[in-house]
Amino acid sequence: MYNQSLDKGPLKDDGRDQDEDRRIEFEHNVLAGYTVEPKDWMPEGYRKTLIRQMSQHAHSEVIGMLPEGDWILRAPTLKRKAILLAKVQDEGGHGLYLYSATETLGVSRDLLYEDLLHGRAKYSSIFNYPTLSWADVGVIGWLVDGAAIMNQIPLTQCSYGPYARAMVRICKEESFHQRQGFELLNEMMNGSEKQKEMVQNSVNRWWWPTVMMFGPEDKDSVHSKESRTWGIKRVTNDELRQNFIDVTVPQAEILGVDLPDPDIRWNEERGHYDFGEVDWTEFWRVVSGHGPCNRDRIEAKRKAWEEGVWVREAIMAHALNEKVVDRHG
Ligand code: FAQ
């Protein structure tokens, strides 16, 4: 909903800090459920937090194309190749919606991308792990897209309109990805012993990195408090992680795979599954650039950026030419 009170121009100077008055009113309106649009007044911290989170999210989508992209040429059948191509293409599309939505906050896509290529911007830790077998493609769909949806559904209710609207479309596509990943694994689990082993091995490698995707525990999350005050984050990292585990354990049972955590068991009192200790040292090692594939991921993107110069120049020349033709008939 467009909120006029967020866009009413300078406040009367009654001796109080104008920005402080505006911030209080802003937070009040956001809590009341108003949607903030690009031209509305917003606190600088809100704008910066959104640029940080939305650009990290966009980078995650485009870096996320790489691990699965490695399997396009090796897909076992034409049908699987077509599905995988479409999925990777969807992820590129998600990156584009998210870069566009971030640009509405007054920052250029080129600048954001430069930050990624120079290691100044983060992207999701999960994409720094290698895809070693075909089963990894199914496990990324089932677990990684499953975790992404769990995190992104509350973002459809985010206070910033362009981000919330991008999330609606992205969630629809991600949920299709999650189901096709599950279907691929289900087929393998009904196949040969070797296929079943591949799936189990893949689940063993991807389970903990997926549980880490939701970010640090709430007690160590630096941005959660402000993000929740501003209606950016609606659900905490730990709540999302718990929800993900609660929905995924029964799915693993249906597939017939074991999750590599001996502490997972139903807790009647809490109404949730208990689970084991996350290795936060590994998480921070990967986030700080020392995961198995961090260097390769950035190198692949840098190479694509450099080799794509002529494409960007051609597109620009074509666009300018169209403009000249438009102007002169
Ligand atoms: N990886 O204070 P918090 C996908 C950083 S999309 C790396 O809790 P916040 C689609 C965090 O940035 C997956 N860094 O932070 C797909 C912060 O560092 P900073 C991406 C992480 O923002 C599927 C510091 O730790 N999804 O998978 C991670 O309040 C399949 C402290 O953390 C999104 O980006 C991490 N996992 O909460 C594609 C969703 N976690 O910035 C291909 C939007 C935390 O101060 C195939 N983002 N950090 O330097 C969010 O919801 C939030 O940003 C969180 C983190 C929940 C990720």
Image (tube, rainbow, N blue to C red):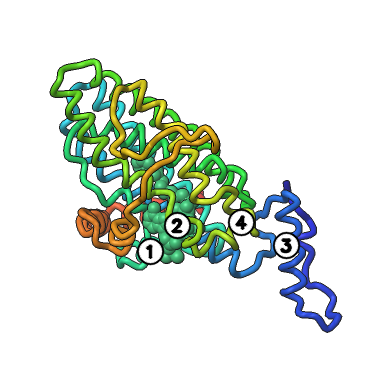
Give yes or no for contact between labels 2 and 1 (Cβ–Cβ under 8 Å).
yes
Label 3 vs label 4, nearer the camera: 4
What residue does disc 3 label?
A: 26
Residue designated by label 1: 121
Sort mark 4 into few (<14), some (14-19) or many (20+) by Cα contacts within 10 Å: some
Q: In the orientation shown, which residue stands out farthest toward the front?
A: 269
| Pointer 3 residue Cβ closer than 8 Å to ligand 1 | no
Q: If you read the primary sequence from the N terminus, does the residue marked by circle 2 or circle 1 appear first?
A: 2
Label 1's element? loop
Who comes first in sequence, dot 3 or dot 4?
Answer: 3
Q: Are marks 4 and 1 in contact (CB under 8 Å)?
A: no
Residue at disc 2, secondary structure: helix
Q: Mark 4 points at which residue?
A: 228
Q: Mark 2 points at which residue?
A: 55
Q: Is residue 37 above or below residue 256?
A: below
**What separation in Å lies between label 2 and label 3 (alpha carbons)?**
23 Å
User: Circle 2: is it few (<14), some (14-19), or many (20+) Cα within 10 Å?
Assistant: many
| Residue 14 position in % (x across, y down) | 86, 80
Residue located 33% across and 56% down the image: 283
Please, is residue 8 above or below residue 236 in the view? below
Q: Which residue is pictured at 30% across the width and 33% down the height?
A: 139
